[in-house]
Amino acid sequence: MSERRWISRLLETDPNDTSLLLQRVLLGLIMFPHGAQKLFGWFGGYGFSGTMGFFTGTMHIPSPIAFLVIMGEVFGALMLVTGLGTRVAAAWISAIMIGAALTSHVQMGFFMNWFGAQKGEGFEYHLLALAAAIPLILRGGGRYAVDTMLQAPKALRAAVRQHAAA
């Protein structure tokens, strides 16, 4: 597949699909505070240094992976909200959710710790995030996605060619 075709496929989406708009914006808004905790220390988080120290020292996650997790939760979330690189952002968030579930949450069981009755959180949240991200990987960002605007020149060229051929 040519580079141009690959990029076109990456940006392609249905510009009238409101459900994809809602999915990507809500997933981005849900993920951003988690990333802001890790990067900025907002919402009771430990900030970049504290999170990197925990990921690399306590969890023994390689520093490049730890860095990508933090950046993915912040910038992947912002990419989802704007619809810029939706498929890449959704895949990034998916990888983070799968990694978090497998490394930290599977052993706690399925359910979140709503009532403080278990030692940690289960993987239910991670599955919900995956359920929101997978359609975005498959179908793109939908209505009002920046990806759609980046595709606009292609659609315009196709319309001009079609008109010229008529």
Image (cartoon, rainbow, N blue to C red):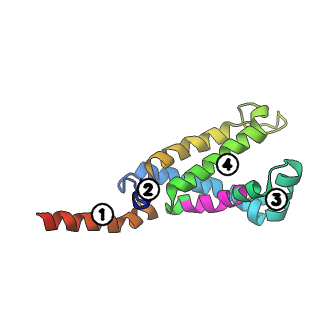
> Splitting the image into 4 quarters, where does residue 6 fall?
bottom left
Which sits earlier in the primary sequence, circle 4 or circle 1? Answer: 4
Kind of residue at badge 2: Trp
Instruction: Determine the residue positioned at 40% across, 54% down.
Output: 13
Left or right: 18 with respect to 83? left
Please name the residue that numbered disc 2 is placed on.
Answer: 6
Judge whether residue 102 is colored magenta: no
Kind of residue at badge 1: Ala
**74 or 99, which lies in front?**
99
Please name the residue that numbered disc 4 is placed on.
Answer: 96
Q: Are marks 4 and 3 in contact (CB under 8 Å)?
A: no
SS state under label 1: helix
Which sits earlier in the primary sequence, circle 2 or circle 3? Answer: 2
Please name the residue that numbered disc 1 is placed on.
Answer: 155
Left or right: 56 with respect to 67? right
What crowding class fits label 2: few (fewer than 14 Cα within 10 Å), some (14-19), or many (20 or more)? few
Left or right: 152 with respect to 99? left
